[in-house]
């Protein structure tokens, strides 16, 4: 069958599939906005790429409806195509079942959704970005270890540099692997020396090895022993290794000294927690890319940011929740204000009640107060006693007690280990301020609304 004939047949099958699935997708706004506008992009091998309106639509369609589209189209054509939805003007957004099949033989494990053009570069991650970008130049460091908290974009950086590297050096071999996947490979090969040697040979063949979450290698002696040999071989032969960890090297306990020494032998960079302005920039960029048909108010944006002030991944997850809610319940171009956001995140608040005993992460509350005062969280938790620091510290105490009814001892534990009497004294000072200053009372009430 010629490619033109094949494309015409698939196009006809797509039209028929939309008719079949319209009654099954019981969401008229979503259908009109995102499903009726789906177009055939291309047919590559056993995959049909269908073009969706934007990134959000592609993600929802891949997660929720790809199998239904595949089943219907294959039934009409009597074929076995995989269906992958891609965002308009963007590269493929693969779902879990097709991620591996999308990789070329020279780029294994790379998720094409994570690119540099959809990564916000700011002060908090600029050093890590510059470090991995050096791989595309003549002078670079090897190995590179990127540390930083959960949800700050370390994995995104690995996949993005993997794609850039293979585009710049198409004859090179790139592999992304999580520490957990590496460990499983090691233990599946135990008691068979031939399989162990094959595993070593495989990992020693990559020009760029990207290993995520190496903190999970702690106490895994056999995996560390094999990684030690791979590490030495690759570094000695000029093959590049980039690793990530959610802990800095000095907190990577239960590793042999020789492994920590290897991790520390190249360049170590740290991704800091982004500030509020950076989080706002990230969120507004995501809204522009994924939610162009809804209007988010300033209050709604501030609420989302304050609930996710330390975690970009959580921020993106909440935006997706809100978007899905909006598509099911609101017309296109609707205004999304803080009432819509709080209603949508009620289930998330219940999860936090289970986890913390409160409907917010106490550290997020402290961060929100510190942001309002323009002071550093570490300073508020420190022993510094200047008024610039003690006032927001006392406000943290007051809010955690009055809004969340947190025990005094627990408040102290979140604020640098302060004792019961210190917490009581701080709360009493805020009570006195509130009696004297009506503007201060409004300030506290506005803080409540953000939480």
Image (cartoon, rainbow, N blue to C red):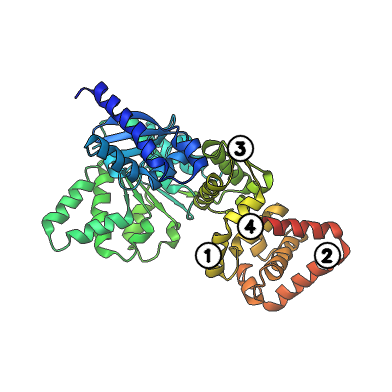
Say if residue 125 shows up in the picture.
yes
Closer to us: 28 or 153: 28
| Quadrant of res 208 | top left
Closer to viewer: mark 4 or mark 2: 2
Closer to viewer: mark 3 or mark 1: 3
At which x and y percent is residue 381? Answer: 64, 64
**Residue at 19% across, 52% down:** 199
Name the residue tied to disc 3: 333
Tell me if residue 49 comes above or below residue 400 in the rendering.
above
Closer to viewer: mark 1 or mark 4: 1
Name the residue tied to disc 2: 434
At which x and y percent is residue 152? Answer: 49, 50
Say if residue 107 shows up in the picture.
no
For residue 367, the mark is 4
Nearer the N terminus, badge 4 or badge 2? 4
Mark pair 3, 2: CA separation? 41 Å
Q: Secondary structure at mark 1?
A: helix
Name the residue tied to disc 1: 351
Look at the numbered discs 1 and 4 and tell me whether their residues touch, using CB distance below 8 Å.
no
Nearer the N terminus, badge 1 or badge 4? 1
Mark pair 4, 2: CA separation? 21 Å
Nearer the N terminus, badge 1 or badge 2? 1
Left or right: 120 with respect to 253? Answer: right
């Amino acid at each position: 069958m010629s490619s033109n004939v094949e494309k015409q047949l698939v196009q006809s099958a797509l039209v028929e599939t939309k008719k079949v699935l319209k009654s099954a997708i019981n969401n008229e706004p979503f259908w009109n906005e995102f499903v009726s506008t789906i177009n055939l992009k291309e047919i590559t091998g056993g995959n049909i790429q269908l073009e969706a309106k934007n990134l959000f639509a592609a993600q929802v369609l891949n997660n929720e409806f790809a199998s239904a589209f595949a089943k219907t189209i294959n039934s009409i054509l009597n074929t076995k195509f995989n269906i992958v939805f891609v965002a308009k003007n963007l590269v493929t957004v693969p779902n879990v079942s097709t991620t591996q099949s999308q990789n070329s033989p020279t780029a294994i494990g790379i998720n094409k959704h994570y690119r540099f053009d959809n990564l916000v570069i700011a002060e908090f991650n600029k050093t890590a970005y510059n470090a991995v970008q050096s791989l595309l130049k003549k002078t670079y460091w090897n190995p590179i270890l990127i540390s930083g908290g959960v949800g700050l974009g370390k994995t995104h950086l690995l996949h993005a540099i993997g794609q850039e590297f293979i585009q710049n050096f198409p004859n090179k071999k790139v592999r992304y692997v999580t520490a957990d996947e590496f460990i499983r490979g090691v233990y599946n090969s135990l008691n068979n020396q031939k399989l162990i040697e094959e595993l070593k040979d495989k990992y020693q063949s990559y020009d760029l090895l990207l290993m995520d979450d190496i903190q999970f290698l702690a106490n895994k002696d056999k995996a560390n022993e094999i990684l030690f040999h791979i590490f030495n071989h690759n570094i000695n032969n000029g093959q590049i290794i980039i690793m990530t960890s959610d802990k800095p090297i000095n907190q990577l306990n239960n590793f042999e000294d020789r492994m920590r020494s290897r991790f520390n032998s190249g360049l170590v960079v740290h991704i800091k927690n982004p500030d509020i302005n950076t989080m706002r920039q990230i969120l507004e960029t995501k809204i522009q890319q994924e939610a162009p048909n809804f209007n988010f108010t300033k209050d709604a944006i501030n609420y989302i940011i304050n609930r996710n002030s330390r975690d970009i991944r959580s921020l993106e997850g909440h935006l997706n929740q809100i978007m899905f809610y909006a598509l099911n319940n609101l017309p296109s171009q609707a205004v999304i204000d803080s009432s819509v956001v709080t209603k949508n995140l009620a289930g998330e608040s219940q999860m936090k009640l289970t986890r913390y005993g409160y409907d917010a992460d106490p550290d997020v509350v402290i961060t929100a107060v510190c942001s309002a005062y323009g002071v550093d969280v570490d300073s508020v938790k420190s022993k510094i006693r200047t008024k610039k620091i003690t006032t927001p510290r006392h406000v943290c105490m007051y809010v955690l007690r009055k809004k969340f009814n947190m025990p005094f001892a627990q408040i102290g534990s979140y604020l640098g280990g302060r004792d019961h009497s210190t917490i009581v004294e701080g709360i009493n000072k805020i009570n006195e301020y509130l009696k004297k200053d009506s503007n201060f009372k409004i300030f506290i009430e506005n803080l409540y609304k953000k939480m």
